[in-house]
Image (cartoon, helix red, strand yellow):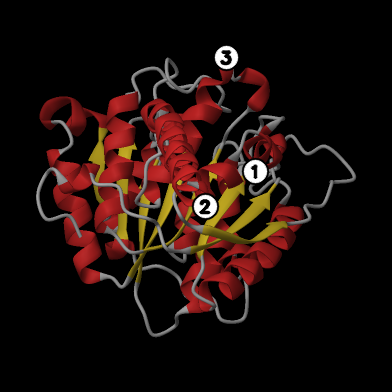
Amino acid sequence: MARDNLSFYEHEPVNQSISIIGVPLELGSDERGLAKAPRHLLKHGLEKVITSLGADVVDITMVPCRIPERVVSAGSAKYLEEITAAARVSCAVVERAVRRGDVVIALGGDHSISIGTIAGASAANPNKRLGVIWIDAHPDVNTDVSTLSGNIHGMSAAVSMGFGHPFLTRIGSGMRNVSPENFLYVGLKDMDAAEIEFLRRESVSTITMLDIAERGLSRARLAIDALRRKVDMIWVSMDMDAIDEEYAPGVGMPTPGGLTRREILSLAQYIGKTCRLAGLDIVEMSPAKDIEGKTVSLALELIARFLGGEYSWYENYMENYRRTNVTNAEDTQAKVRRA
């Protein structure tokens, strides 16, 4: 827990066991190429980032995702069976990891992966209350009845709260839905009329981009504090399209007017320093669209901050000096012993 404003910049080892779970699922979206993101993040050094914080990567699992026999362009819940199958597996994998005390990093894929990951985190601790911080430009609270597109990634938050198709709301035998009062949105800006109605009806806490433009991150910080005090664990669902396209071009739906780099890194840092995480999702990354690797680099920095640490150019810069100093000290000690 941070003691003062300088505490957020203190570097302490992240003594946690980490499970990385890749869910290369893109059928919840119209966008193709999202399924490549889990391996893309691993290829660009996710393990190194985590171990540099002092944490241990104890498991890496890639969830099998079925390839559909036909292309579906319409329907109230497209690719329902395939997404349900992937959600059941990811639910079981996350539940097992959280039960043994790991913090889970789930890599999508599109945002429909959160149906399984949040279900698993909720089921892992049936006697504890799970809160969800959903960072996204979109609330994803359509259902198979209200949807215009039929894309399940636009239903995933509603499902986690217990609303929607029964195939999705009953993932896993021990599934417990997250209460709407324990959901917090940050970064909302693109919403359907049915979604606005849902959020009002269920009294879900929301921090919109207008709120942030008007008051900075102060309301978001207060809302995070209020949520963490009434739940036992937090799950963060980070949709990379919440970030302005200038800083995160490599996403399924690039967003003008989204969160700035400073805003999202500050949010991640605050959450990582103040909240007890069960795990997090990183979703909706499209490696093929990622200009100059901006999005993958930012995603790695965010993961480090959500875990309570930091991985940045400055950390890498100073690490060279730390290694040099250690080497020089060892050489000096060896010379003294020989003398």
What percent of the width, then of the height, locates residue 29? 64, 37
Q: Do the residues labelled 2 and 1 touch (CB within 8 Å)?
A: yes
Neighbour class for label 3 at 10 Å: few (<14), some, many (≥20)? some
- Above or below, 76 relative to 99: above
Separation (CA) of disc 2 from disc 1: 9 Å
What percent of the width, then of the height, locates residue 44? 63, 33
- Above or below, 138 relative to 134: above
Q: Mark 2 points at which residue?
A: 156
Three-letter amino acid code at the position of disc 3 = Ile
What percent of the width, then of the height, locates residue 294? 51, 21
Separation (CA) of disc 1 from disc 3: 24 Å
Comparing labels 1 and 3, the label whose residue is closer to the camera: 3
Mark drawn on residue 124:
none
Q: Mark 3 points at which residue?
A: 291
x 12%, y 40%: residue: 218
Q: Which of marks 1 and 3 is nearer the N terminus?
A: 1
Q: Is residue 8 left or right of residue 297?
A: left
Q: Is residue 283 left or right of residue 12?
A: right
Mark drawn on residue 28:
1
Q: Which of marks 2 and 1 is nearer the N terminus?
A: 1
What percent of the width, then of the height, locates residue 176? 47, 75
Three-letter amino acid code at the position of disc 1 = Gly
Neighbour class for label 1 at 10 Å: few (<14), some, many (≥20)? many
Residue 58, quarter of the rendered image: bottom right
Separation (CA) of disc 3 from disc 2: 28 Å
Mark 1 lies on a secondary structure that is loop
Given residues 186 and 307, the one toward you in this image is 307
Three-letter amino acid code at the position of disc 2 = Ser
Residue 130, quarter of the rendered image: bottom left
